Image (cartoon, rainbow, N blue to C red):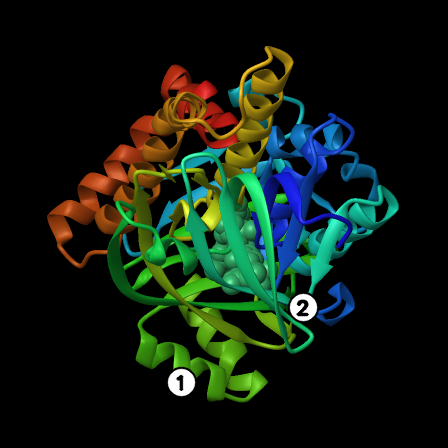
Amino acid sequence: MTADHYDIVIIGGGPVGMALALALHDTGISSLLLEARGLPEKVEDPRPLALSHGSHLILHRLGIWNTLTQKTPITTIHISNRNSFGQTILTPRDAGVSTLGFVVNYHDLFRSMHQKLDESKADYIAGATVTRLDTRENSGIVYFDYQGREEKVTAKLLVLADGGQLAKQVPYITYQTHDYQQWAVVANVKAEKKQTGIAYERFTNSGPVALLPNQEDFSLVWTVTPETAKEIIAMNDEAFLMRLHQHFGDRLGKFIGAGKRSAFPLALKYATPVTAQRIALIGNAAQTLHPVAGQGFNLGLRDAYELAGEIVNTKTTAGEIGTPAMLSRYRQRRQIDSSAGRIFTDSLVKIFSNENKILKQTCGLGLSILDCTPPLKRFISRRMIFGARG
Ligand SMILES: Cc1cc2nc3c(=O)[nH]c(=O)nc-3n(C[C@H](O)[C@H](O)[C@H](O)COP(=O)(O)OP(=O)(O)OC[C@H]3O[C@@H](n4cnc5c(N)ncnc54)[C@H](O)[C@@H]3O)c2cc1C
């Protein structure tokens, strides 16, 4: 650590916190990033991230895009409803863009961003766990454990990008939560048919199952009940691949290979408001969404990018960083995008994960109508790609 006071202290060096640190670099604004985990080589998070074309553009501007070695283009999104008619196919042409997005691996993105921060000599402390926050009218104070000692740093603005634990200590910020009673089982799988750039999103009674193109093969995100997740994790590969084939159907032939399986509990969680005295929330700390339609990180990246824009504007216009006026502008900038992303993913899960035959047929009809209504397709695909600005 080079100083004990900064303009900004970012708490949580996941991909969203690191994106903010990179966006603030070279702007004349001093920032420190505190991350609880150790060195990035040790971060092995198995989840795939489907990045929208909009996120690709942001990562490009942050100097990250060309450093990512594994990025698989998504050329088509195929949405279908198991045990019912109706499907929709989205292509770049529907959205008026060159590509719908890309699939990357969380840990690759994490490492590339960390390397960029290292190269840019940003102030970053790995292995620093924030334990306490305190704020005054003019500054915020962060207490953290580092190498067995308690350290302290102050800033004009504290940004919580920690996934959502620390904001529980902050007066006036409350979380609304909904436990989906679903877990996502994640694994890399090989099918008889090679991937051709198509991302499959299939809705089933137990929840959506996604197969995303990832290099030669697929990344699976399979939503199931908590009990089924435990069962699937405990199965041998052969039984697992057979179960997946029964569940997904024959579109890709049989599944013939699987990597390590992991499971994540799924809940909707969002903070109101997303700011408090000298504090702003971004990424999963502001809203944690169901992974259906791959919106969470894309939304969090826009939080980081727009907050950076607001901080830089404030500084350029000789305003003070972290004041109620600045935080109110940030809240307003993010309100529509954040609530639209939340309502969109939550509705998809609730409407499509049901066993009611009439509702299921209505969903199938909805997919068929969407498939032959280009303006609606354009609206939905641009919303998924660019957020509310789409
Ligand atoms: C199965 C699955 C699939 C997904 N697929 C997609 C997808 O395809 N597309 C998409 O856009 N999104 C997807 N998401 C969502 C995406 O993973 C998250 O939105 C994204 O990881 C949020 O990033 P973040 O940096 O806000 O939080 P996190 O990734 O949770 O990072 C938070 C960081 O804060 C650190 N931290 C926590 N507490 C402290 C503390 N006290 N002190 C210091 N540091 C702390 C943690 O160590 C961590 O590094 C998926 C999620 C899941 C579960």
Is residue 200 shown to the viewer in this render?
no
State the quadrant of the N terminus: bottom right
Tell whether circle 1 marks a residue whose Cβ is less than 8 angstroms from ligand 1.
Answer: no
Q: Could you tell me which residue is drawn at 45 percent across and 23 percent down? A: 326
Name the side, left or right, on which 99 lies relative to 248.
right
Task: Judge whether 125 appears above or below 270 on screen.
Answer: below
Q: In x, y percent, where is residue 303?
A: 50, 34
**Viewer-nearest of labels 2 and 1?**
2
For label 2, the residue is: 127
The amino acid pointed to by label 1 is Glu
Residue 138 visible in this rendered orientation of the protein: yes
Q: Does the residue labelled 2 lie within 8 Å of ligand 1?
A: no
Q: What residue is rendered at 38% in x and 38% in y?
A: 277
Distance CA(mark 2)–CA(mark 1):
34 Å
Instruction: Return the residue nearer the eye: 381 or 333.
Output: 333
Q: Quadrant of residue 331?
A: top left
Callout 1: 10 Å neighbours few (<14), some, many (20+)?
few
* Mark before the other along the chain sequence, 2 or 1: 2
Q: Which residue is drawn at 74% across and 26% down?
A: 28
Q: Quadrant of residue 232?
A: bottom left
**Rendered location of residue 170, percent (x, y):** 34, 51
Badge 1 is on which residue? 231
Q: Which residue lies furthest to the top in this view?
A: 317
Left of 211 or right of it: where is 79? left
